[in-house]
Image: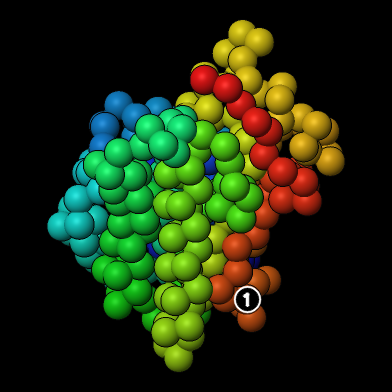
């Protein structure tokens, strides 16, 4: 019997590469998938990619803005009502742009923090009350949280806040036996990093800072998500797993605009 058989997994930002790869890993192990993203066409592509590998997957696509609290609350209620249970939440929304700190304005910082932090908070705040003992919430941080990153300070601050949310939620939800953890991807091939890989790009500057000598693939992160979703990590909470080729052992590169 598949380890996650009968369980419901809810994923925000589900049209992204890491989200799709993680959905495949969860579906392969038996979980039904409630997938939320802003655009119907993106959800359709993700669903097709999942079914190409896991043709028996049970999928509920939900179109909605993952940065809208009411939309997230409504989507979580729909996911829970689908089979009467909610077992896994994977919040993937995030991102940020390159701006020197002294050129950063308050509105850009606020927008970056809200985009990364509040989208995870909404999933925790409105998802946890629907979960029973054994539930697992997984947030998406970044290798840019523990390591400062020149010109990417707003993102560094925002993802550091996500990790603080993970620790606070893990502490308070422990009594309900709901685990809260995060994955910290390093530079991974995905839509949001396409510019870094374009042409010669800036990606090459990262390689000397990766002891394993290669960039991440969405499947690298998906394996960690599956681990955090399942019983193998049943006595783990409040952790942020670095899936970054060893980047956390070194530093982020000095990029120029």
Work out whether residue 64 or residue 8 is closer to the camera in this orientation and state it.
64
Name the residue at 78% across, 38% down.
210
Q: Is residue 76 left or right of residue 138?
A: left
From the image, tell me which residue sits under label 1: 236
Q: How is the image coloured?
A: rainbow
Residue 147 seen in this snapshot: yes
Residue 14 seen in this snapshot: no
- Number of marks in picture: 1
Q: Is residue 75 above or below residue 115?
A: below
Q: Is residue 26 above or below residue 234?
A: above
Name the residue at 54% across, 61% down.
182
Q: Position of residue 147 (x, y in %)?
A: 63, 50
Q: Is residue 4 left or right of residue 187?
A: left
Work out whether residue 179 or residue 144 is closer to the camera in this orientation and state it.
144
Q: Is residue 56 above or below residue 208?
A: below
Location of residue 124 by image quarter: bottom left
Name the residue at 57% across, 13% down.
198
Name the residue at 61% across, 35% down.
188
């Amino acid at each position: 019997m598949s380890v996650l058989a009968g369980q419901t997994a809810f994923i925000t930002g589900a049209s992204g590469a890491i989200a799709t790869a993680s959905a495949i890993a969860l579906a392969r192990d038996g979980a039904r998938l409630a997938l939320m993203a802003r655009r119907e066409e993106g959800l359709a592509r993700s669903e097709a990619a999942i079914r190409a590998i896991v043709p028996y997957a049970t999928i509920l696509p939900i179109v909605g803005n993952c940065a809208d609290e009411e939309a997230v609350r409504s989507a979580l209620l729909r996911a829970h009502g689908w089979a009467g249970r909610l077992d896994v939440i994977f919040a993937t929304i995030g991102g940020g742009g390159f701006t020197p700190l002294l050129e950063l304005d308050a509105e850009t910082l606020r927008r970056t923090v809200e985009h990364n932090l509040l989208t995870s908070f909404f999933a925790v705040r409105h998802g946890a009350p629907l979960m029973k003992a054994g539930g697992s919430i997984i947030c998406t941080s970044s290798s840019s949280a523990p390591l400062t990153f020149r010109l990417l300070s707003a993102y560094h601050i925002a993802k550091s806040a996500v990790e603080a949310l993970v620790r606070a939620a893990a502490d308070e939800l422990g009594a309900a036996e709901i685990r809260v953890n995060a994955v910290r991807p390093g530079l991974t091939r995905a839509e949001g990093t396409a510019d870094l890989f374009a042409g010669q790009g800036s990606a090459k500057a990262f390689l000397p800072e990766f002891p394993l000598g290669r960039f991440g693939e969405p499947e690298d992160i998906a394996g960690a998500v599956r681990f955090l979703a399942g019983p193998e990590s049943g006595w783990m909470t409040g952790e942020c797993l670095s899936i970054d080729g060893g980047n956390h052992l070194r530093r982020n590169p000095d990029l120029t605009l």
